[in-house]
Amino acid sequence: MNATLQAVRKWAAQTARLCCGVPDYDVYVKHLREHHPAREVPSYGEFFRERQEARYKGGGGRCC
């Protein structure tokens, strides 16, 4: 696969995740390493679960 197609594919996947409320894990890891080097980097599974909980179990949601 050429570099341009790979870049477009990565952009499309990142955009789809953001539309669903899931930030990009690679960007998150980069941020942690640059700004919070003492913090442990969570696995992708831990990251995903934390984001889901933050989005859907934040209290005061739109549920009946």
Image (cartoon, rainbow, N blue to C red):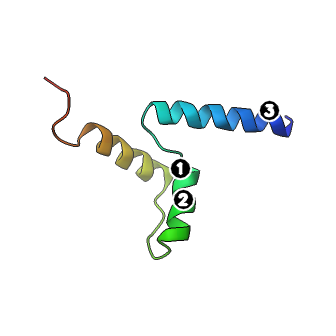
Q: Is residue 54 left or right of residue 30?
A: left
Q: Residue furthest right?
A: 2
Residue appearing at x 70%, y 32% in the figure: 9
Label 1–label 2 contact, CB within 8 A: yes
Q: Amino acid type of disc 1?
A: Tyr
Number of other residues with Cα within 10 Å of mark 1, as a class: few under 14, some 14 to 19, many 20 or more:
some
Q: CA distance from mark 1 to mark 2?
A: 6 Å
Disc 2 element: helix
| Residue 64, disc | none
Residue appearing at x 50%, y 69% in the figure: 35
Q: Amino acid type of disc 3?
A: Leu
Find disc 3 in the rendering and name its residue.
Answer: 5
Indicate the position of residue 4 as horizontal and vertical percent values.
82, 36
Q: Is residue 63 above or below residue 55?
A: above
Report the quarter where the N terminus lies: top right
Disc 3 element: helix
| Residue 25, disc | 1
Find disc 2 in the rendering and name its residue.
Answer: 29
Q: CA distance from mark 3 to mark 2?
A: 24 Å
Task: Looking at the picture, tell me which residue is in the foreground, 62 or 40.
Answer: 62
Q: Residue furthest top?
A: 64
